Image (cartoon, rainbow, N blue to C red):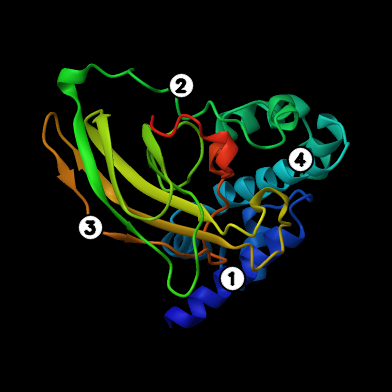
Amino acid sequence: MEGAIEQAVGRAIVSMRENFGDQLTVDDMARAAMFSKFHFTRIFQRVTGVSPGRFLSAVRLQEAKRLLATTSLTVTEISHQVGYASVGTFSSRFRCCVGVSPTMYREVGGFPSRACVENRGRAPVRRCGTVCGRIRPPLEAKAGLVFVGLFRDRLPQGQPVRCMILQEPGPFVLEKVPPGSWYLLSHSVAADRHEVIRGPLDDDPGLFVGSRGPVTVRSDVPVRVADIWLTPARVFDPPVLLALLDLRAAAFRKRIC
């Protein structure tokens, strides 16, 4: 049964990636999965960790990142090409999810280095905790630089609460973490790949991901999470939107945030 459910969700995701520029609805996605709308929404959330609408939005913005970094299309043209009727809505959503505006993303070639340092020092030290653990490398593959960060939900988008960059898989310590429940997400791109320019149907991007959560943080109480294994990104993993995650060594002169 689980195999049939994953196949159905996979069909819906393929439909999203092939038709992201169209005005897709949950009904359209459910038909691609061959389930009723309400049952489809439940199983999609269970398999991917996010709703169908949020997954589709992530697919669209991932393609927008690629077009901004590799073409001369205007922001307006790109917004329409990835399914947004309003360039204002597109720009607002892009900035919220990626961390910079579409224009800035294009200017820096997809590799802004400031996103991780902007959240430094916002929470009072006396009320914060620490999250630590170890990132394990993928089997039979070599990871590049490794990002690890705490987010409000399962989607790696927007500003992380705390994050750091590792030169390679290994131990990490995130300090000054505000109390609350967070999702720990990790991401790495193979050294011989270019994650920014991969297309929506690229099934071998050299992208590795890992996650744990929710992680509950209390004031002044260290939290030791279980090891996180990096594994090749699957079709069910939402696209990584945070611009900082487009890893490149030159972008990380400041490696801790």
The kind of residue tagged 4 is Ala
The kind of residue tagged 1 is Gly
Question: Residue drawn at (56%, 42%), measured in percent from left and top?
Answer: 249
- In depth, the one of 129 and 140 nearer the eye is 140
Name the secondary structure under disc 4: helix
Q: How many marks?
A: 4
Report the residue marked by disc 3.
226
Question: Residue drawn at (54%, 54%), measured in percent from left and top?
Answer: 238
Q: Position of residue 120 (x, y in %)?
A: 37, 21
- In depth, the one of 48 and 37 nearer the eye is 48
Name the secondary structure under disc 2: loop
Q: Does label 1 or label 4 sit earlier along the sequence?
A: 1
The kind of residue tagged 3 is Ala
Name the quadrant containing residue 13: bottom right
Q: Which mark is residue 10?
A: 1
Question: Residue drawn at (41%, 62%), measured in percent from left and top?
Answer: 230
Task: Report how far apart the C-alphas of labels 1 and 4 lie in the structure.
Answer: 28 Å
Q: Does label 3 or label 4 sit earlier along the sequence?
A: 4
Report the residue marked by disc 2.
118
Q: Residues within 10 Å of mark 3 (few under 14, many from 20)?
A: few
Report the residue marked by disc 4.
69
Decide if residue 60 is on the left or right side of residue 165: right
Vertical arrangement, residue 128 with respect to residue 250, above or below:
above
Vertical arrangement, residue 121 with respect to residue 134, above or below:
above
Task: Report how far apart the C-alphas of labels 4 and 2 lie in the structure.
Answer: 23 Å
| Contact? badges 3 and 4 (CB < 8 Å) | no
